[in-house]
Amino acid sequence: MSVHKEIKRITTRTLQEFKAEGTKISMLTAYDFSMARIIDSAGIDVILVGDSASNVMAGHETTLPITLEQMIYHASSVVRAVERALVVVDLPFGYYQGNSRLALESSIRIMKEAGAHAVKLEGGSEIRESIERILTAGIPVMGHLGLTPQSIYKFGTYTVRAKENTEAEKLVEDAVLLEKTGCFALVLEKIPAQLAERVAKKVSIPVIGIGAGGGVDGQVLVSHDMLGITKEFKPRFLRRYLNMYEEVQNAVKQYVDDVKSRNFPNNEEQY
Ligand code: KIV
């Protein structure tokens, strides 16, 4: 039996154990019941209800417009489907930055109304107070450093972060601070592989990378990207496991043809 079948429910503690024993952590995004069910049944360790829902579900250019209510809607649909994975939910932009009370309130709503297991916040020292306050309620917090899409207008681009020494050192300091503050895990997005490996070795909490190389404790991808539902997004770090855009398009074309040509429904497909 494979390792994922033996574990009934993944917890933050399981992820710590995975890091300690050198078992890599698998993580994917999901935003709805049907996809979450498939992903969970395939043995994923962590499901992230990412604010990337703003892009792939709602068609926005950035993650900034998505609201707390919309995140709760997506998260509650995912939680209803999941039997094994740890469900982590992104706190959306504007619900935690510079306001630790709002951060706590928003996190409590995500836990209470969606039934999530943990929340994820983007940033380092500047959001420390928010993280500390959320932790007082017993809510597990996952950090996120490197390319943090909620700050896109500060960066100006989605290119690789922390290539320069000063930014790299600040990232390492932030990672240590997040661990000390009490985060149970950390996402590193789009940074040099060597730097990500250095962070993973320095902190004892699991480090999960996206575009951060293989020297970290686990990997996360946006499910719509790895399944090929999105077509134009082709960063170097992305491995596509399916070409769903074309497969679905071909199936729909076939259906249209069948309806037009009266091939569907046939005698067996009616009452
Ligand atoms: O929102 C998201 O999908 C994320 C991942 C890219 C880590 O934060």
Image (cartoon, rainbow, N blue to C red):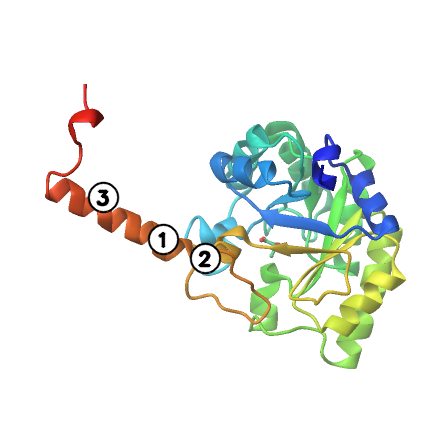
Q: Quadrant of residue 134?
A: top right
Left or right: 61, with 160 as reference point: left
Residue 241 is situated, as x and y percent measured from the top left of the image, at 52, 57
Can you say whether 217 is above or below 268 in the image? below
Element carrying mark 1:
helix
Quadrant location, the C terminus = top left
N-terminal label among 1 and 3: 1
Residue 208 is situated, as x and y percent measured from the top left of the image, at 72, 56
Q: What residue is pinned by disc 2?
A: 228
Tag 1: residue type? Glu
Q: Is mark 3 within 8 Å of ligand 1?
A: no
Residue 8 is situated, as x and y percent measured from the top left of the image, at 73, 30
Marks 1 and 2 sit apart, C-alpha to C-alpha, by 9 Å
Quadrant location, the N terminus = top right
Q: Residues within 10 Å of mark 3 (few under 14, many from 20)?
A: some
Q: Residues within 10 Å of mark 1 (few under 14, many from 20)?
A: few
* Nearer to us in this view, 135 or 50: 50
N-terminal label among 3 and 2: 2
Label 1–label 2 contact, CB within 8 A: yes
Between marks 3 and 2 in the image, the one whose residue lies nearer the viewer: 3
Tag 3: residue type? Tyr
* Nearer to us in this view, 146 or 5: 5
Marks 1 and 3 sit apart, C-alpha to C-alpha, by 12 Å
Can you say whether 140 is above or below 168 in the image? above
Tag 2: residue type? Gly
Residue at 78%, 73% in the rendered image: 194
User: Which numbered disc covers residue 247?
Assistant: 1
Residue at 78%, 72% in the rendered image: 195
Residue at 63%, 33% in the rendered image: 109
User: Which numbered disc covers residue 255?
Assistant: 3
Left or right: 20, with 134 as reference point: right
Residue at 49%, 51% in the rendered image: 54
